[in-house]
């Protein structure tokens, strides 16, 4: 496809007309807003930035597969000037309303391919963060989640649409540029006609060879110190561009914070190896851990994780965040939730597998402490009256809550406890194998685990994911002794949670010491059990002694 001519002269500093007003970020789409007429296959992105400019210039060439006759093109794009738009090399009429570029493509049929070329510029309202870092140096970082890609890149800004991407970034000569994928070549002097501010700049090229969601598509630029942490997952990374198929794990930080960051990232290579062994091959070309100006503690961008500059700059040990974000490379980045309401498939998985690394590396007690801290977050949360899969949510940012993170993690922990380690991890590996580089919904995960377990798990997924709350348990014992018999113990278990929460089905056990355990199934508001004993147990029984059920107990 012939590249758009981008030789134009304009004095951005003297622009008098007002940019289009940007829409609000984080608003969930209406039903049917993404009809899947077109499937984005590849983004070719060129961005021109400067260290003394608050504006940038962009060029995007997007290749689409037509998935229905007479499709409609809808591209999310907001708050910037749209300078030119071509479809298959031809100018075409379009509408640009409420942050969406709309075009009727009546002459195209299913299975055809079209290329949309767009040239644009302006001062980004969000998504592309042009600012000074904590040390006063100018930096530029992309920060997309949940649907803020549209503030700097015309795109189908929805997690269900994944594509490959390559970047050409013209950045100040003093800066380093990081992006998803692998670096195609060494940076070289930008040509005179390179887009963006006319400064002394270098051109960086990065290429992503496997499909990723648009919220993962990022680059960052600034004065950075780069350290190779090591190589991981050798012969276990199909996307690696190295001859040995190893994953290069690196650290990109501001020069002032190099020493402060060491403790947080000292085991990053071990994490990649552990998750590769536990889940499946590492999905991307490399793994860069980057200090940046993300609004989050960490953002799991595929192969280029961005971490809070403030946390690293203050010398905090964020190793827990590092493990969480690296786990996201498999869950969220490679296997992506097809809709934001199923975010637990990303955040709950990253929370639990992030914790599992510490169980593997530091022992079960550390892991149990982390799960207990997560349990306390859940029972003390303001979100307990909402289910994990919350179809009524009107603000995507509010999905970043205790339901999708620790409660989602606890759902996996309970499923592991019910299935047993062998079946659970076999199911996890099968789920990943089936959906890597694709999107999935909760029903897809449930189906895989049901096939592995060999039984219907509707009861489990329905109560834990589609209903609010958790069981609050009242436990009572009474010893019954009659002359001439050994005696019996009556146990009364009540679920005393709110009436609007479900009565939970809980397969578990009660133990009076390590050797004396009774399996039970709780499935009613109030249940009584009677157990025969040769003598009265010396201690009150412990319900769920291994801590496999998310619950609270009444005092």
Image (cartoon, helix red, strand yellow):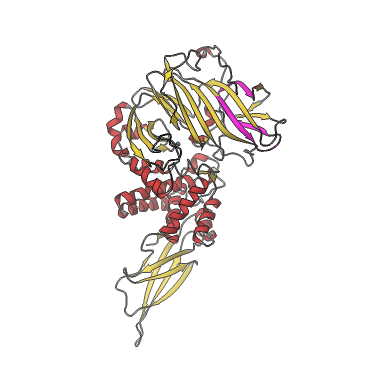
Left or right for 167, reference 21:
left
Q: Main secondary structure of the magenta part?
A: strand
Q: What stretch is highlighted in magenta?
A: 60-89
Q: Residue furthest left?
A: 259
Q: Relative to residue 166, is residue 378 depicted above or below?
A: below
Q: Is residue 69 magenta?
A: yes
Answer left or right for 75 relative to 525. right
Q: Can residue 68 be seen in this view?
A: yes
Give whichever of 159, 69 is nearer the camera.
69
Quadrant occupied by the N terminus: top right
**Image location (x, y in percent) of residue 189:** 43, 16
Position above or below: 102 against 387: above
Picture mark count: 0
Q: Residue at x 50, y 24 (%)?
A: 124
> Quick one: quadrant of the C terminus?
bottom left
- Image position, residue 392 (x, y; %): 57, 46
Q: Where is residue 51 in the image (x, y as percent from the top left)?
A: 41, 19
Most extreme residue toward the front, as rendered? 243
Looking at the rendering, which quadrant does residue 552 occupy?
bottom left
Tell me: 427 left or right of 114.
Answer: left
Residue 90 location, quadrant: top right
Residue 462 painted magenta: no
Measured as percent of width and height from the top left, residue 327 is found at 41, 44
Which residue is farthest bottom? 484
Q: Can residue 500 be seen in this view?
A: no
| Left or right, 546 with reference to 385 | left
């Amino acid at each position: 496809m012939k590249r758009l001519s981008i030789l134009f002269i304009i004095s951005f500093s003297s622009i008098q007309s007002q940019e289009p007003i940007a829409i609000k970020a984080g608003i969930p789409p209406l039903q049917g807003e993404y009809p899947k007429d077109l499937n984005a296959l590849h983004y070719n992105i060129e961005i021109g930035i400067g260290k003394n400019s608050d504006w940038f210039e962009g060029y995007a060439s997007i290749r689409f597969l037509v998935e229905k006759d007479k499709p409609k093109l809808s591209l999310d794009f907001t708050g910037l000037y749209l300078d030119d738009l071509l479809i298959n090399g031809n100018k075409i009429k379009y509408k640009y309303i409420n942050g969406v570029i709309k075009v009727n493509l009546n002459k195209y049929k299913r299975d055809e391919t079209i290329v949309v070329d767009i040239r644009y510029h302006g001062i980004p309202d969000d998504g592309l963060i042009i600012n000074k870092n904590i040390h006063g140096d100018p930096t530029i970082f992309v920060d997309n989640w949940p649907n803020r890609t549209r503030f700097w890149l015309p795109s189908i800004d929805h997690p269900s649409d994944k594509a490959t991407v390559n970047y050409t970034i013209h950045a100040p000569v003093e800066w380093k540029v990081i992006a998803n994928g692998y670096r195609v070549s060494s940076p070289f002097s930008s040509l005179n006609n390179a887009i963006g501010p006319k400064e002394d700049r270098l051109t960086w090229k990065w290429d992503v060879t496997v499909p990723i969601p648009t919220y993962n598509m990022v680059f960052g630029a600034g004065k950075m110190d780069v350290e190779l942490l090591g190589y991981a997952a050798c012969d276990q990374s199909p996307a690696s561009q190295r001859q040995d198929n190893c994953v290069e794990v690196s650290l990109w930080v501001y020069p002032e914070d190099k020493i402060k960051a060491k403790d947080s990232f000292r085991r990053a290579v071990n994490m990649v190896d552990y998750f590769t062994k536990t889940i499946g091959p590492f999905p991307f070309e490399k793994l860069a851990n980057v200090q940046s100006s993300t609004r989050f503690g960490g953002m799991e961008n595929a192969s280029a994780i961005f971490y809070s500059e403030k946390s690293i700059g203050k010398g905090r040990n964020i190793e827990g965040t590092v493990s969480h974000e690296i786990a996201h490379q498999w869950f969220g980045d490679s296997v992506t939730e097809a809709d934001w309401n199923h975010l637990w498939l990303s955040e709950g998985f990253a929370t639990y597998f992030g914790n599992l690394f510490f169980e593997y590396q530091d022992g079960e007690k550390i892991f149990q402490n982390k799960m207990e801290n997560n349990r306390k977050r859940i029972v003390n949360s303001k979100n307990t009256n909402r289910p994990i899969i919350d179809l009524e949510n009107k603000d995507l940012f509010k999905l970043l809550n205790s339901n999708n993170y620790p409660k989602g993690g606890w759902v996996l922990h309970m499923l592991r406890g019910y299935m047993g380690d062998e079946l659970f991890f076999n199911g996890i590996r099968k789920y990943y194998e089936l959906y890597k580089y694709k999107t999935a919904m909760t029903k897809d995960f449930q189906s895989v685990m049901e096939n592995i377990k060999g039984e219907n798990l509707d009861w489990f997924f329905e109560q834990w994911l589609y209903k609010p709350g958790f069981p609050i348990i009242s436990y009572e014992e009474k010893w019954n002794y009659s002359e001439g018999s050994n005696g019996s113990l009556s146990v009364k278990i009540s679920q005393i949670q709110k009436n609007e929460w479900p009565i939970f089905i809980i397969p578990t056990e009660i133990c009076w010491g390590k050797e004396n355990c009774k399996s039970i199934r709780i499935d009613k508001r109030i249940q009584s059990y009677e157990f025969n004993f040769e003598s009265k147990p010396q201690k009150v029984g412990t319900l769920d002694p291994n801590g496999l059920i998310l619950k609270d107990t009444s005092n």
